[in-house]
Amino acid sequence: MPDNTEKSITGTEIKTYLPDFCDGDVFLRLLLVVELISIVFALVSFGGGNLWIHIGLISVIMLWVGLSTAILLCLIQRRGWLGNHLRATVITISITLLMTLLASFMSLSFGSALRFGPTALDVGYTLTRNLAVAAILVGLALRYFYLHYESDQRLQIQARARLQALQARIRPHFLFNSMNTIASLTHDQPDIAEQAIENLADLFRASLAAESSIALRQELELTRSYIDLEALRLGDRLEVNWRMPEGEPTLDLPALTLQPLVENAIYHGIEPLSGGGTIDILIEPVANHIEISISNPLAPAHQKRQREGNRMALENIRERLDLAFGGAASMELKESETSYTVKLLIPMAEAV
Amino acid sequence: MKILIVDDEKPARDRLARMVGGLAAHELVGEAVNGVEALGMSQSLEPDVVLMDIRMPGMDGIEAARHIARLDQPPAVIFTTAFSDHALEAFETHAVDYLLKPVKQDRLQAALDAATRPTRAQATRSNDLLSGLEARQHICARVRGNLVLVPIDNIYYFQAEQKYITVRHTEGEVLIEDALKTLETEFADRFVRIHRNALVSLAELAGMHTDNDGHHVIFRDIDDRLEISRRHLPGVRKIIKQL
């Protein structure tokens, strides 16, 4: 079962999109970027005098802002006060502006004492300018962190999908029982055995590409291959009732969205029932969406097995739907005494 | 030897049947599709060896094996399974063999050739080993030579009387040979001890009745009353308060 590996990959520590400022590497890179920006500003604003002193002064101010902001953020992160994305954003911007304000005042007082830099006359202008620059820079930085975080998440979710798909295929229960079925059929019904091997191959191939997106038609084909394979094993204990509209709707969806749901339905719904049962698969256009619902009967309460693996598969399907359709796709679970239904709502137009 | 095959999947049964058919020294006497059938056939067909799948709907192979071990002349049970999980580690240390699916012909032959009927004592010992695993879903009793399975859900209480334990359930009563202590441990989350001689189902418990005769528990659906001993009174009170 996929518990341990899953947990380590899912992780629970990273809560916001900000990098870990306590990390030495992140810290150094931040300082480097700040220094480079300081040099750019110094070169642009250089109006005569000693260039090195000019660069030095601007660097001191900007590095001080960068350094103090990073240290404060690190302290706040350590205590877990950043909370959600919004809060993290507000806190970061506030701290940066505050530090800029402090740095500006310091530079003003030191500057006039040392007789260089802005004089008291343009205090208002200087402060506004510095705050504006700081706001723009921190805005850009946050945007960069967010994009970085998003692509990271995407990669993680996709990797998880592939891992889960493969784990489902090499789940000993599935793998060895399928092989046993094939071993049995090879003797008496070699044609069916051949088909079973083809279906098994399709499923493995799909699992290796679980991060891609495919047409609904292909996903349905794969789901049928899977059902055919399980039907050999379960015989008349498994009945599947398909309800489809005339002409399959064309739409793309993340690969292995439906097959794992049917697999769950069989594993948790049909197999524990001595007499077997029926899985209902309903596909129906609703407004500009396609509704797909899969329901299975439930065994009496005391026979219920652990559903940890099930939850994880569902969670991953939900994540991938979010990734592919933004918030436009949804997944809904309904559980009653005697049945369990998963309902997907997928938009037709904005396919991936 | 007489062989009984138990598996819920037809291709798996077919394959084992064909393999057993190829062995001159052994004879297939029956095929069962779940644990309950396996238990009935173990008694009626008197096989020497049961080839038992583990994961089956209704009653699984492990529970069936535990009931079979209590028969007078228990057959040897050889588990056949698609994977070796924790349960199997227990068997590895014991006389009972197990085969991994898809089973190989020579491995099957070796296991069958080595199998001999365990004595009742051995079977009971392996049963003790199994009792550490998971609570049974049924109690198996014998009524006039026939096996009767009582689902745990249907049981009101166990009451010990000298050598036997009375199992009071929705359909009546049966007698079993067991120790109340073992039942108490096995069903700790579903039954509570109210007296040296009685365990009561938490689900069926309705409350407590007190009069000159002392304290008694009463049930939802039946009029039976069982005495609560002084030692168990505080514990029972606490449970009844939470009802």
Image (cartoon, rainbow, N blue to C red):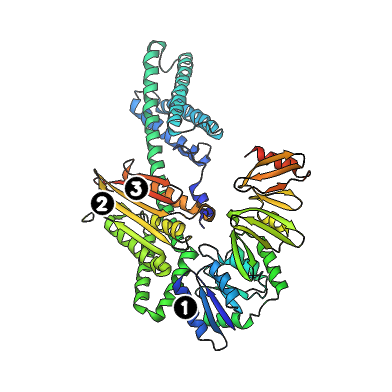
Front residue of B143 and A256:
B143
Residue receiving disc 2? A251
Left or right position of A174 against A282: right
Q: Which chain carries label 1?
A: B
**C-alpha distance separating marks 2 and 1:** 43 Å
Q: Residue B15 carries which label?
A: 1
The vertical placement of B96 against B243, above or below, is below
Residue that sits furthest to the bottom in the current view: B24
Residue receiving disc 3? A344
Left or right position of B186 against A69: right
Is the residue at mark 1 from the same chain as the one at mark 3? no
Q: Which chain carries label 2?
A: A
Disc tally is 3
Circle 1 SS class? helix
Q: Which chain carries label 3?
A: A
Q: Earlier in the sequence, mark 3 or mark 2?
A: 2
At 55% from the left edge and 84% from the top edge, which residue is drawn? B27
**C-alpha distance separating marks 1 and 3:** 40 Å
At 64% from the left edge and 60% from the top edge, which residue is drawn? B133
Viewer-side label of 1, 3: 1
What amino acid type is highlighted by mark number 3? Leu
Circle 2 SS class? loop
Q: How crowded is mark 1: few (under 14 residues within 10 Å), some or many (20 or more)?
A: many
At 38% from the left edge and 59% from the top edge, which residue is drawn? A278
Q: Does residue A323 appear in this view?
A: yes
Is the residue at mark 2 from the same chain as the one at mark 1? no
**C-alpha distance separating marks 3 and 2:** 13 Å
